[in-house]
């Protein structure tokens, strides 16, 4: 068998384990002298508790992180960073908060420490999506990758079950697309398969017992691997469609990924069956059928119409998701994508 690949890992320091959040003091002291702590308004109390724990290592809290990293919020946070005398960033939260930390670092190269509290995976990618004047653009740069990521499963115990499920399925989408990525390599594929195994085992336990710390650990481990795959190989149709539905139709990030995953995986299985075989093995049945049954078992949303997408939007969504050529294992043809979106809209199982 011929093997040709390029392997270029993103170097973050990862500190993983129950109670790992206590190490944030040591990590801040290694990188700087005072950290600005970032969160959403919803997680402000977590950020304030962290500021108290950090004592003189804290330069204050900025709790205005928002979905899709609006540039006006970043500018406000940059001013707060400068005024506070901070020399590093601590982000506590999911992709929205991590996005704000990345946006600051992209502009001033401040070192970042992330305490990840969802399964979205942004903390281990050098990718930043930001919005200005209603337009979402994506940049990739070495300054964007957080220097340190702390994964403490205890920080995820409070993530509501429904969000845990959709966030976990969002993570799985990175692994599934990583398996057939054009620039996949043996390490990214190993990570993707182990990630899918971990999330397949953990998510049903979290649904029935949200405080089960072993399941929380396993899910967080899986999402670290999924994020690592996302940061190291190229994504395809699934991410393009979710980006379109989020950016142009304002659909929520994790739920959209959760609904689309069985459909896009089934669509691409036609051309990438060999690479997706582990998915069929782990979830049982066919690639799309197995993923769909898993989502239903978890009580995940299955219909785009329930997220507020109108049937009349499907044509434009298919149009947008098929313009600007990008690599996908199966040719991306508008009518086929429109049919797939139609099934996802009404909540039917994938073809
Ligand atoms: P999020 O960060 O928007 O969080 C959703 C809500 O849940 C927020 O109010 C948050 O404060 C709250 N929350 C987070 N963790 C919690 C916890 N443990 N307990 C209780 N509440 C909690 O959601 P997300 O799905 O993590 O991130 C979505 C955003 O991240 C999108 O904008 C997406 O584009 C971006 N993203 C970027 C990348 C990348 O590599 N650049 C990767 C994945 C996602």
Image (cartoon, rainbow, N blue to C red):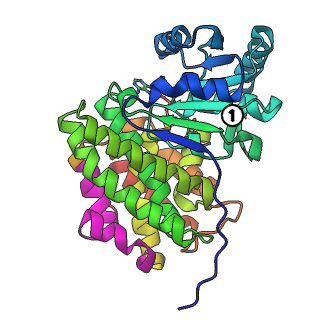
60 vs 88: above or below: above
Q: Nearer the viewer, residue 347 or 195?
A: 195
Q: Viewed as shown, does residue 307 lie left or right of 74? A: left
Give the tally of numbered discs. 1
Element at label 1: helix
Asked if the beta carbon under badge 1 is closer than 8 A to the nearest atom of ligand 1, the reply is yes
Q: Which residue is mark 1?
A: 102
Residue 220 in picture, x, y percent from top left:
40, 42
- Residue appearing at x 71%, y 60% in the figure: 324
Write down the quadrant of residue 203 in the picture: top left
The residue furthest left is: 208
Quadrant holding the C terminus: bottom left
Q: Is residue 241 magenta?
A: no
Q: Is residue 329 left or right of residue 157?
A: right
Please say whether residue 145 is visible from this viewpoint.
yes
Magenta span:
273-296
Residue 10 placement (x, y as % from top left): 65, 53
Q: Residue at x 50, y 45 (%)?
A: 312
The answer to whether 243 is drawn above or below residue 251 in the figure is below
Q: Residue at x 53, y 7 (%)?
A: 52
């Amino acid at each position: 068998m011929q093997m040709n690949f390029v392997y270029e890992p993103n170097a973050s320091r990862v500190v993983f384990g129950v109670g790992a959040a206590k190490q944030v003091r040591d990590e801040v002291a290694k990188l700087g002298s005072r950290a600005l702590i970032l969160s959403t308004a919803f997680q402000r109390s977590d950020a304030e508790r962290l500021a108290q724990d950090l004592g003189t290592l804290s330069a204050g809290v900025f709790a205005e992180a928002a979905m899709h990293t609006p540039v006006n919020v970043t500018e406000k946070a940059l001013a707060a960073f400068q005024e506070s005398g901070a020399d590093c960033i601590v982000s506590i939260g999911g992709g929205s908060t991590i996005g704000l930390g990345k946006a600051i670092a992209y502009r001033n190269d401040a070192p970042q420490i992330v305490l990840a509290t969802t399964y979205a995976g942004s903390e281990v990618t050098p990718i930043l999506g930001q919005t200005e004047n209603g337009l979402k653009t994506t940049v990739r740069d070495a300054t964007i990758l957080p220097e340190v990521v702390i994964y403490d499963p205890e920080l995820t115990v409070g993530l509501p079950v429904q969000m845990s499920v959709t966030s976990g399925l969002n993570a799985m989408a990175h692994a599934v697309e990583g398996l057939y990525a054009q620039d996949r390599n043996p390490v990214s594929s190993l990570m993707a398969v182990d990630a899918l195994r971990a999330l397949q085992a953990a998510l049903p336990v979290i649904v029935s017992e949200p405080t089960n710390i072993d399941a929380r650990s396993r899910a967080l481990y899986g999402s670290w691997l999924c994020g690592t795959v996302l940061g190291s190989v190229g994504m395809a149709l699934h991410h393009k469609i979710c980006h379109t539905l989020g950016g142009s139709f304002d659909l929520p990030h994790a739920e959209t990924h959760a609904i689309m995953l069985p459909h896009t995986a089934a669509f691409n299985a036609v051309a990438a069956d060999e690479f997706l075989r582990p998915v069929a093995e782990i979830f049982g049945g066919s690639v799309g059928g197995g993923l769909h049954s898993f989502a239903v078992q978890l009580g995940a949303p299955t219909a785009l119409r329930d997220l507020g997408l109108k049937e009349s939007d499907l044509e434009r969504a298919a149009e947008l998701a098929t313009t600007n050529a990008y690599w996908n294992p199966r040719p991306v043809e508008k009518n086929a994508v429109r049919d797939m979106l139609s099934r996802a809209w009404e909540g039917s199982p994938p073809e």
